[in-house]
Amino acid sequence: MAPLLELEGVARHWPVKGGVVRAVDGVSFTLARGETLALVGESGCGKSTTARLALKLIEPSAGRVRIDGADITGLSGGALRRMRRRAQIIFQDPFASLNPRLSVGEAIEEPLIVHGIGDKASRAARVRELLGLVGLAEWQAGRFPHEFSGGQRQRIGIARALAVQPELIICDEPVSALDVSIQAQVVNLLKDLQERFGLAYLFIAHDLAVVKHMADRVAVMYLGRIVEVAETRRLFADPRHPYTRALLAAIPRPDPRRRGMVTPLGGDVPSPLNPPPGCRFHTRCPLAQAVCREVEPPALEVAPGHRSACHFAAELPVVERVAEGGLSPVAARRLALFGQSAPSTLT
Amino acid sequence: MSGEAILRIEGLRTRFGAAAAVDGVDLELERGRTLGIVGESGCGKSVLSLSVMGLVPRPGRVAEGKVVLEGRDLLTLPAAEMRRVRGGQVAMIFQEPMTSLNPVHSIGAQIVEAMRAHEPGARDLRGRAIEALRRVRIPSPERRFEEYPHQLSGGMRQRVMIAMALACNPRVLIADEPTTALDVTVQAQILDLLRELQAETGMAIILITHDLGVVAEMADEVAVMYAGRVVERAPVAAVFDDPQHPYTIGLLGSVPRLDEDRERLLAIEGSVPPPFALPPGCRFAPRCPFAVAACREGMPALRDIGVAHRVACIRAPVELAA
């Protein structure tokens, strides 16, 4: 069976004064039904552009996007609309993506109208059902976006995406703008909905801890290219690209015993207007050799399903299994108690 | 607290009309130490720092309390005197350096302007500004001096802000989410820089952040804020190993970790109440799984529960309450 989503050599180049910005420069991956693939990387790596290319919200300069084996790059009009019924998107800032003049009920109903689904009564029933699915109350259908908190607005964005019963939801930094306690609510909701409806997620994020929690597989992007892709557990246990290693080493852990173990990566991401020759990471790579400055590394398979675009992918030393403390027994016990106790019903 | 406090905040209450965004906060900060202030949007952590700086926007005002810096209560200083303190003894950096920098002046001119404001007669300001840029490890500072904010990356801009803040050798640096807008590899560079500069100068840092990883990396002491009040105060290790307040416990559980696998995150139900609609009694009670009727009746005071460890919860420690 064809994968649900497949990108093959997809590129997006923006002509600008003085050259071409290669925002996405030859990206290939597949996403299976019910699977979560995370695209991670720092600002400017092209992950959000890739998300938009996957839905044909922007036109690729090169390459193919297939949904269920069918090329969508040439679609327009009704055929494009039918494709989008299968694949929806939610954004980082749900407030910016909601029309302030539409009530929440109208906003959730809108995709049903666009796709010609149901009559007025059945749509109203569906809106009530969707509100319940995302943890909002039916009476809130008449309220307007400004009356909701950030977390609730993201729930509205999720309800809108779910309305047309898609198989795939592209989540573009869906929790980055939310406070941590709210972030946890939305992450849990996305996982519940996935289990319930067999959704596939293309999950765009920069927070690797969230990604580790959400994703089945992870693709790491740098300057418009995927530099490493692997099953999540593998990627975190045995990263085979120096950039992935640098990202992991830069994350401050919520554990004071690990203080000072953060290793910053030097320099800044180079301009995508003029990416370095050879391996694009060589200007910041602590292990770069002469060959890295000249020859672009191919994506080598280092293990089944694990590919790394580094000349030395197979030779990198094993990552030291830094004794990762985790929570103290006292803290772990209190967290468990917090989770078990039913939320207070006192009023 | 062993050493002597360089900054002491006592009973600080900052009101916007009838609503108190900061509602009775006591904190102290020692020389060369970092106090992490943790909380989510709306907990009052940014209003607290603006109160210390005398920068609370209208119609807000500091209604009560003291902010004592090296023996002087800043809240009683005349405006001209406070201007000298601000940027002089106490400096501040913000989350988004681009909005704090003037886009039409070179960064050099902006650093010189800040220096001139505090030392009207000073000489060789250009040389000192270049030195300030070098101090924050900006490569080729002579060239960068002439450049404009848009020519710099986000990390470089934050370095410029730090250079400007440190130009007059402040005793206290307030850093309000200084790395939140930065990529993780650049964040690590800026945190390293702040630590090195602190070791060089002995300045005290108030680090405001929502990121528990940044707190674990940087803070010596931690204050957890919720709805305008400090709910827990402890040395950094105790906050992570022995979290006492249910809100602190909930925060720790909300964060996905690289060092463990959990099927579900611990979500704290509901959201932070706004300062104009606070619940009676403990403000966390409506979201607290351990709350009992008594929690709704009176505001819990901070009480000692361990070495330098204070918590504002009548149910702590929760394993005895459950």
Image (cartoon, coloured by chain):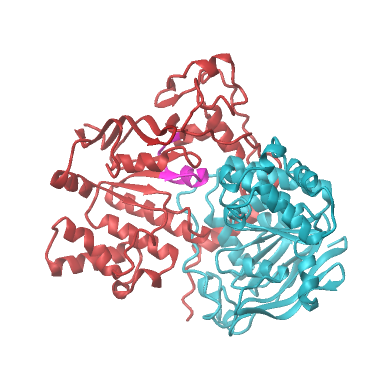
Chain colours: A red, B cyan
| Magenta-drawn segment | A204-220
Using the rendered view, name the quadrant where residue B248 is placed: bottom right
**Residue displayed at 51% across by 21% down:** A313
Q: Position of residue A181 (x, y in %)?
A: 51, 60
Q: From this view, report whether residue A184 is shown above or below residue B19.
A: above
Count of all numbered marks drawn on residues in the image = 0
| Horizontal side, residue A211 vs residue B193: left or right | left
Relative image position of residue B197 (x, y in whole percent):
77, 47
Residue B225 lies, with reference to residue B238, above or below; the image says below
**Residue under the image location 51 percent in, 25 percent down:** A276
In screen coordinates, is A109 left or right of B72? left
The quadrant in which the C terminus of chain B is found is bottom right
B297 or A82: nearer the viewer: A82
Residue drawn at (54%, 14%) of the image: A291
Task: Examine the rendering and report whether any part of residue B220 can be seen.
Answer: no
Residue B99 in magenta stretch: no
Q: Position of residue B131 (x, y in %)?
A: 78, 43
Q: Closer to the camera, A198 or B46? A: B46
Q: Between residue A275 and residue A67, name the one nearer to us.
A: A275
Residue A324 at least partly seen: yes
**Direction from residue B69 to residue A133 in the image, left or right:** left
Q: Residue, x 80% and y 62% (percent of image)?
A: B89
Position of the N terminus of chain B, as image quadrant, is bottom right
> Residue A164, position in %: x, y?
21, 55
